[in-house]
Amino acid sequence: MVELRIFYDGGCPLCLSEMKHLLSLDVEQSIDLVDINQSGFEEKYPAINKHKADAILHGQLADGSIILGLDVTHKAWTLVGKGRWTAILRWPVVRIFTDWVYLLFAKYRHPLSRLITGKSRCESCSLEREKC
């Protein structure tokens, strides 16, 4: 059963790398990944504003509620058994700082991707569990 649907930027090399890593660890298949750049995205997911999802990571829980940013990250890593590594990001005092840093990262993820991977954008593609 899918417990979390993540709406990610498939054109971002860093984002794509993290999603591939998540899928490789998701043995329970509890995470569904949706590239916000896919054709027909707005029609398939009318509740998700593509421009807002491009600015901050969006996730949808099984009950339909929407979570954002590092809450999505922590939920995803928790589902694959690695939540202890991201739990500190959600501690009350720490979260104020980490949320600010995340928003800064999200805004500049393409230049950061270029610095780290040599590519600021990659051709958007869909991930399949079999390919990871």
Image: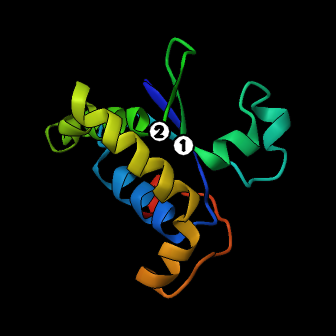
Question: Which circle marks residue 69 in the picture?
Answer: 2
CB-based contact (under 8 Å), mark 1 and mark 2: yes
Task: From the top left corner, tell me how far across and down residue 63 is, in percent.
Answer: 51, 11
Residue type, label 1: Leu
- Tell me if residue 95 can be seen: yes
Disc 1 to disc 2, how far (Cα)? Answer: 5 Å
- Which residue sits at x=40%, y=40%? 99
Secondary structure state at the residue bearing disc 1: loop
Quadrant of the frame with the N terminus:
top left
Task: From the top left corner, tell me how far across and down residue 82 is, in percent.
Answer: 19, 42
Residue 3 picture quarter: top left
Between residues 75 and 92, which one lies in front from this camera angle?
92
Residue type, label 2: Gly
Q: Is residue 81 left or right of residue 132?
A: left
> Total label count?
2
Q: Residue beneath label 1, please?
A: 57
Secondary structure state at the residue bearing disc 2: loop
- Which residue sits at x=55%, y=75%? 111
